Amino acid sequence: MENEDFAKNLAQSYSNYLKVDISKDVASVEEIIDDTLTRLEELESSLSIQEDDCPNVIQKLQNHKDNLMVLCEKVHKLETFVNRVEHDVNQMEAKVIAAEYDIKDNSEGKLKNLFKPLLFMKPEAMATANNTRIPPFEPPKIFETKSYFPSSNAEDKTE
């Protein structure tokens, strides 16, 4: 009998080790599930609002599509215009640099030699000195604004 009591006692002691209190774990899992359900409900309500607004937004987008296409066309024309202006400015800058170089070459030493021709040159030499003038400036052909920006009267007629 003593062995029986000892075995019951031992079984009772071991059973205490095997008892697991999962109530804390279950409570945290239930809290996570409740939080997830709340978020899902919020998402569902947000989606239903978006679903209700979707046809209105699509209609507004379709209404603004033509305006957007006109705006894109204007931007494209403006890009073309800016590229043309850049080209013309670069061309003009090259001409200015060349003209500055020509003026520098033709004006070097003129201050030193200002009185020499007047005092010591013969009339024939003076005539050839006058012929070595700077060539006349030929302006480059640049854009015309009317080709990029039609007059406002033409726009009024089309609208």
Image (cartoon, grey):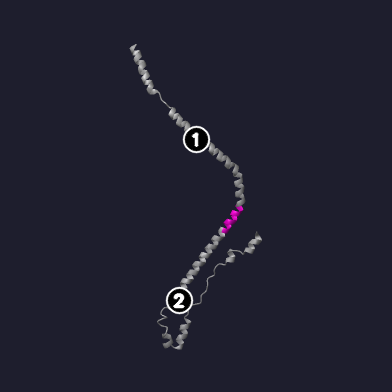
Residue at (54%, 36%) from the top-left corner?
41
The one of 159 and 103 positioned closer to us in this rendering: 159
In this view, which residue lies farthest toward the top? 1
Name the residue rendered at 46%, 88% in the picture. 123
| Placement of the C terminus among the 4 image quadrants | bottom right
**Of label 2 and label 1, which has the lower sequence position?**
1
Q: Position of residue 22 (x, y in %)?
A: 43, 27
- Amino acid carrying mark 2 in the image: Ile
The residue segment tinted magenta is: 65-74
- Secondary structure under badge 2? helix
**Mark 1, residue position:** 36
**Label 2, label 1: how far apart the Cα atoms are:** 82 Å
Q: Residue at x 50, y 69 (%)?
A: 92
Q: How many marks?
A: 2
Q: Position of residue 102 (x, y in %)?
A: 45, 75
Q: Nearer the viewer, mark 2 or mark 1?
A: 1
Instruction: Give the dominant element type of the magenta stretch: helix, strand or loop.
Output: helix
* 92 lies above or below 49: below
Pointers 2 and 1 in contact (C-beta within 8 Å): no
Quarter residue 67 falls in: bottom right
Locate residue 49, reporting x and y percent: 58, 41
Q: Residue at x 46, y 87 (%)?
A: 124
- Answer with left or right where residue 55 lies relative to residue 7: right
Comparing 35 with 127, the one in front is: 35
Secondary structure at badge 1 equals helix
Counting other residues with Cα less than 10 Å from the Cα at mark 1, is it few (<14), some (14-19), or many (20 or more)? few
Q: Which mark is residue 103?
A: 2
Q: Looking at numbered disc 1 in the image, what kind of residue is underneath it? A: Thr
- Magenta stretch: includes residue 70: yes
Residue 105 percent coordinates (x, y): 43, 76
Establish if 11 lies above or below 58: above
Q: Residues within 10 Å of mark 2 (few under 14, many from 20)?
A: few
